[in-house]
Image (spheres, rainbow, N blue to C red):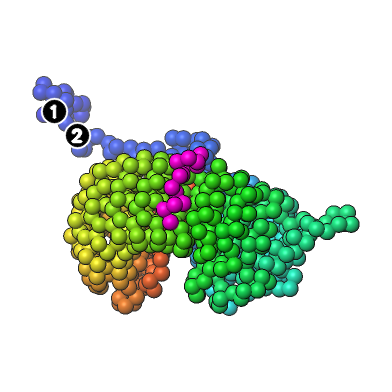
Amino acid sequence: MSVRSPSSTRVPSTTGMSAPDPIDDPAPEPPPAMDAALPAAVVATILSRLDVRSLLLASAVCRCFRSCASHALSFLPAFHLLEVVLTHNLLRPLLPRNPALRSLRLDAARLDDDAVDCLARPGLHELTLRNCNNISGRLLRELSATCPDLRVLSLNSLADRRGLAMTFSDLRALLDGCSSLETLRLAFDLSKFDNPSFSHVWSSASEGLFSLEMGFIPLQMLLALLAVAIESRQRIGYVKAPVFFPSLQKLRLTDSPIMEPESATATDLTDAGLQQINPKGKLKHLSLIRSQEFIYTSFRHVNDLGILLMSEKCTNLESICLGGFSRVTDTGFRAIIHSCPGLHKLKVTNGSHLTDLVFHDIVATSLCLTHVSLRWCTLLTDAGIERLSFNKGLNVLDLKDCKSLGDEAVRALSCLPRLRKLVLDGTMITNQAMEYLGVGVCPLASLSLRGCYKLTNDCIPLLFAGSVKESLHALDLSRIPSLTDDAIMVIVRTRTPLTELRLRENPEIGDASVKALASMQFEGVTRGSTLQLLDLYDCGGITLLAMKWFKKPLFPRLRWLGLKGSLNRIMVDALVLTRPFLRLACGGEELGTPYRDTSGEWCRHEDDDSEDLEPWHLDGEAVSDAETVNE
């Protein structure tokens, strides 16, 4: 111990270093503020190179970072924030006046017409908005007046809420005002634009338009559009006849009739009409779908002859999607496969005459398929999938409701070294198929087994016995009657970093599964930290006791939650208030955007810390450094 002299000097102890004097030793000095340790200009330069999500997370560090982040928002060229659903009040401070902004991508589920002025910003080259249900056609008019240089426009579910106005004049204003459009995606009901001039207004569309996607469009409107397009190419004697879509390379059309189309050629698509869709042979991506949302129907006036003639002009196709061509047989589908050497993505829905013969000699082609979807192709068997598996570059495979498929098909697929997404909903597979996947080489990131009723709890340890547990992020185990809480316990013990787990309509799944998932550990982090989507709709064992496991800080990254609507509404509403960034579905609707067939996007896994943005968003009030640390 140390000895104090009268002059208060300290004498070193002979036994080693002296202990600090609690009276004479001053308290340790606090670390310097960030703006004193690092110039603000350096901090601002670093933050300006971050994406928006990282920038907002950095703003919670201290006042210096907050100030620099706020300044960076005024000159960012791109604002992409699809992970979080913001209201107009929360979005407005994040989008200050910014003449450099060129690209804006948002989830607009909580935005309405009050946000239109904030969205239609001068200088924009790209605007992508998901879930525009609460925004009317006013957005199209504002874009035409404010964004003449717009090149990419993608809108989903615009004005879908009952009572919102959207008229033909809104579409006309958009096409007249945005004369530089190159990509146009209108994924909503285009019947709202029904007007005698609908087919003619497209003559004012940008000549540089190379990608056009339409949601539901009545067949009569589509046929009128095609008729005017053909007429425009046949006109002579004009200095400049209007040419429809001279640069079009991507076309996606979907209809959903409410009654069976008549046999007359004027009211339905025929073999002859099919030839007018790609007369110049420039299309690289083609999607023609007859949805069966209202009645079971198909393109009954298109057969193999129409497909054979069309395939002669489709040698440049890279992706094709055909839905509802019930009279097309293996002959027509094989013609497409053998006529398109650059084909990478193939999707056939409701191919009632598609059999294994389609892929019989696929080895003899130069195809390198990466995305294949064969939903409701009920005649396809294990032998056809074995032939298809010769495409070792397969990345996405959707075999939903191919009811003739069994374990041997999965055995062939388990050897694919690049297969990242596999959908086996409604097939006849057993636990043996899961053993094949468990010992296979597929780096699966997404696996859907919905409705595979022959599976039992034993399939889970078989699936997670190999490397799948290291790569799997999305798993759908819905509608498997024999699945119980014991299976979920096995998943938890594997510590697989799942971000999506769907368990809907399983009668034996209950509160024990929720408790186990809430305490799931991954790399030392507990509280179910990796799950972003959890669907428990109509699980027979879920009670009100499970609600406490969804409170903070449990499930910190959860963004989508599905529960049965019969649970206590007061507790459900209280959960929504405490977690404003959680989207709760109680009506049985599908959560998120499952089974997206996009290249690479569906399997990307990023930690979602967006709920940590709440302190910075709410009310725009200053938060002390101590409060920031506590948050």
x, y (%) of residue 123? 68, 51
Q: Amino acid at mark 1?
A: Ser
Look at the image and tell me in which quarter the C terminus lies.
bottom left
Crowding at mark 2 (Cα within 10 Å: few <14, some 14-19, many 20+): few
x, y (%) of residue 389? 39, 45
Q: Residue at x 80, y 58 (%)?
A: 234
Magenta-drawn stretch contains 366: yes
Crowding at mark 1 (Cα within 10 Å: few <14, some 14-19, many 20+): some
**For mark 2, what is the residue?**
21
Instruction: Classify 466 as above or below 129.
Output: above
Q: Residue at x 16, y 27 (%)?
A: 18
x, y (%) of residue 30? 34, 39
**38 or 575, which lies in front?**
575
Callout 1 touching callout 2 (CB < 8 Å)? yes
Residue 424 appearing in the image: yes
**For mark 1, what is the residue?**
2
- Secondary structure beneath label 2: loop
The magenta span reads 355-368
Q: Residue furthest top?
A: 14
Magenta-drawn stretch contains 240: no
| Distance CA(mark 1)–CA(mark 2) | 9 Å
Instruction: Classify 86 as above or below 11.
Output: below
Instruction: Classify 195 as above or below 346.
Output: below
Q: Is residue 428 left or right of residue 14?
A: right
Of labels 1 and 2, earlier in sequence is: 1
